[in-house]
């Protein structure tokens, strides 16, 4: 089944009402970009999805293996540089997994987090097709 996101940009700054039909969030741009900074910026929304997928995958794999896991946190830092071939994006990911785990178990959880759906999706091939409504 396809994922459908609907968005409506309103006149204030660059505020956008984003919905999947069940849940709604506000997106915006920072004040430095002439937004009102009342919501996450587009790049922050992408990083949020990646982070959520990674920490969720860690918890899923831990539960599947009956491993004792406490808090799972991640910090993502995105850097973008312009080059001859276009934009080059680097994302640094720091993860912390609390719990009664061996180093081997933690290594396996990190390895599985790097295979999460959104990580694979972002590394995959994209066709973005503009269709005027």
Image: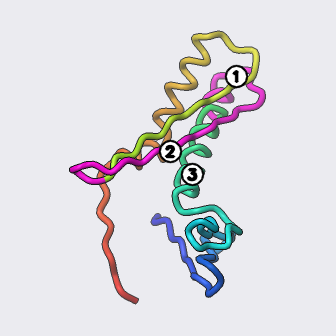
Q: Which residue is mark 2?
A: 78
- Give the spatial CA distance, label 1 vs label 3: 25 Å
Q: What secondary structure prevails in the magenta region?
A: strand
Label 1 packing within 10 angstroms: few (<14), some (14-19), many (20+): few
Q: Are marks 3 and 2 in contact (CB under 8 Å)?
A: no
Label 3 packing within 10 angstroms: few (<14), some (14-19), many (20+): few
Q: Which residue is mark 3?
A: 49
- Give the spatial CA distance, label 3 vs label 2: 13 Å
Residue drawn at x 68%, y 25% as measured from the top left: 97
Residue closest to the eye, 38 or 127: 38
Q: Looking at the image, which residue sits at the far left?
A: 84
Q: Which residue is mark 1?
A: 66
Q: Left or right of 132: which side holds 57? A: right
Which image quarter: residue 131?
bottom left
Which image quarter: residue 86?
bottom left
Q: Position of residue 43 (x, y in %)?
A: 52, 57
Q: Earlier in the sequence, mark 3 or mark 2?
A: 3
Q: Left or right of 39: which side holds 84? A: left
Q: Earlier in the sequence, mark 1 or mark 2?
A: 1
Q: Which residues are magenta?
A: 60-86
Q: Position of residue 26 (x, y in %)?
A: 67, 70
Q: Secondary structure at mark 1?
A: loop
């Amino acid at each position: 089944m396809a994922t459908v996101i609907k968005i409506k940009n309103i006149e204030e700054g660059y505020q956008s009402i984003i919905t999947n039909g069940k849940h709604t969030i506000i997106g915006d741009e920072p004040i430095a970009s002439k937004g009102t900074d009342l919501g996450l910026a587009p790049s922050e929304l992408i990083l949020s999805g990646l982070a959520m997928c990674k920490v969720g995958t860690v918890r899923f794999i831990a539960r599947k293996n009956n491993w004792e896991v406490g808090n799972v946190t991640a910090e993502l830092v995105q850097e973008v540089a312009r080059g001859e071939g276009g934009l080059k994006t680097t994302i640094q990911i720091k993860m912390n997994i609390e719990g009664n785990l061996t180093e081997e178990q933690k290594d396996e959880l990190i390895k599985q987090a790097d295979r999460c759906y959104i990580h694979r999706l972002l590394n995959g091939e994209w066709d973005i097709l503009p269709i005027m409504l």
